[in-house]
Amino acid sequence: MPAPVPASAPADAAAVAPVAPSAPGVRRTRTPLLALPEARWAALATVAFLLALPLQLLDATAWSWGPLYAVAYAAGGWEPGLEGLRALREKTLDVDLLMVVAALGAAAIGQVMDGALLVVIFATSGALEALATARTEDSVRGLLDLAPATATRLTADGAEETVPTAELAVGDVLLIRPGERIGADALVVDGASDVDQATITGEPLPVPKAVGDEVFAGTLNGTGALRVRVARDPSDTVIARIVALVEEATRTKAPTQLFIERVEQRYALGMVAATLAVFLVPLALGDALTDALLRAMTFMIVASPCAVVLATMPPLLSAIANAGRHGVLIKSAVVMERIGRTDTVAFDKTGTLTEGVPQVTDVRPEPPYGEDEVLTLAASVEQGSEHPVGRAIVAAAHDRGLSLRPVEAFDSVPGKGVSGTVSSDLHVEAGSPAHLGQEATTTPGTEVAVLVNGALAGRLTLTDTVRACAPDAVRALTSRTDHAPLLLTGDQEHAAAAVAERVGIAPGDVRAGLLPHEKAAAVRELADAGRSVLLVGDGVNDAPALAAAHTGVAMGRGGSDLALETADAVLVRDELGALERTVALSRRARRLVVQNLVIAGVFIAGLVIWDLAGHLPLPLGVAGHEGSTVLVGLNGLRLLRERAWSR
């Protein structure tokens, strides 16, 4: 039989220093936007452009606004220009360099403002991409803080020593005091307690742990002391694997690119070759250098992909703005385009389909007691408990306006229940039916038996309440995607089945008891079968699956830092009904992108043919080019209207 827990372990949570409550994630200082070089250069380019534009429009002297435009060109263009030159060295040509050349070409023929605007757009896009990358890295590093830096190891003679968790070895025995975070994946060898392991499994309630049970690094011990034996190397804990999975998925997830990015190499090469031909062929046939250069510059302007870029971006950015007004934060235009391809939606359970907080949903008294009396007695004795079940029972009594009674001789047994003397003559016990010698019923949720002077007075059922919007959201997404949503959860199978039934998910579409890496594997399995998966989750345990999914969506109000940063989009108000609207909006945006590409293509082709077959006047070429750009931009802005969301 294992030796008892050392006497130095405090008897209850009040005996240890206060510990921050378990949270879905870890709050860390995030990389500020202006700490990134890309953001500082983009900000400088934008400020210079905004100062120059009104001066030019007011017909001020060119000496007043010209230097400001020069600053905008230099600040916003040097980095993409440098990257483009590096790409040239690798024998590739990208749109970044093409945009810089087009901007300089525009300036060379007097369209200084157009070129500067193009440079500012590209610089801002690069800064936002750099910020997203930095924030994700911050959160992944912050996840490691879930596991404590040190642990209390017991030596062979029972003495205690504090050691770094990185130095723990399989077989070491650790002492976990009440309120401490567990430092390693381990097995309990002595003691009993409730452990909050929501960060790993997503379960809404602390889980009773006794001898032989597994505990995970980074989870929070309750009011009992535990002795545990390390079962895994610190580099192989579940928390460490979550970090590795998120980093790997972020690195290897094939980037979904916008149309212009998918064809940029061919377009860039074709445009450069064509511009050189337009310049050199007439020159070789005897045209004057000035005429040949002017024709080539005109060609480069009318053939430049400005209208194509704006054909793609305004619809997607307008859709992002519209979704944002309705509580859906989309992190980029690429994400907005990708959401429309969704054909399968997968949900986490706790905190996503459910509120994530247990509530008393049923009170079943035994004669001669009534509902209110059973709830009053249970809540009275639970007043001294810090367990979430106890807090939920007390809250239910307060909601009914019941007056709680004084309690004497309060006692709590971790993982089993509480007891005390109520009103001086009633010995009340509240806890698990098995601990109190009662047969458990087959009710979905957590059951609490209430005994008075040894006799059963009633039973309480606590469940994690399903969000009111969840059933409608599941029905709408089934209709929109033509596939029924799935439920992927780390919670127990009976709890998952109960929630699935209430929201309308078929039993065959439920996968329960999944650890974080198993959730990610389930998403990859669907992707391998050709599905475009949109996963909705909120916790640290969802982060690998969010990263692996075609599109990851995090719950905004209770989502962990890691989930919020890993996800591609955030439901700011936790309104699941907005998902179907967002998918529909994305599909409308993609249709407008196609329309705009056709419009831009027709204009570019017409102007190019005119320039090659005849003599296109430069002002007319610029007007046609800018006109097509304005036209596709205005067409894309249609998605800003409220009707675009309501449809």
Image (cartoon, rainbow, N blue to C red):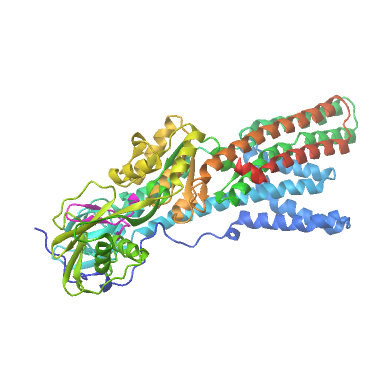
- Front residue of 245/368: it is 368
- Front residue of 306/397: it is 397
Vertical relation: 291 (above or below) 472: above
Q: Position of residue 578 (x, y in %)?
A: 53, 46
Q: Position of residue 340 (x, y in %)?
A: 55, 37
Q: Position of residue 569 (x, y in %)?
A: 52, 47
Prevailing secondary structure class for the magenta stretch in the rendered image:
loop
- Front residue of 267/175: it is 175
Within the magenta stretch, is there residue 276? no
Q: Quadrant of residue 483?
A: top left
Which quadrant, please, contains the C terminus?
A: top right
Q: Residue furthest left?
A: 1
Q: Please state if 207 lies on the left or on the right of 248 as rendered.
A: left
Q: Position of residue 11 (x, y in %)?
A: 20, 70
Q: Please state if 340 lies on the left or on the right of 6 as rendered.
A: right
Q: Residue at x 21, y 58 (%)?
A: 458
How many badges with numbers are in the image? 0
Within the magenta stretch, is there residue 219? yes
| Range of residues picked out in magenta | 201-220
Q: Residue at x 49, y 38 (%)?
A: 476
- Residue 434 visible to an observer of this rendering: yes
Q: Quadrant of residue 369?
A: bottom left
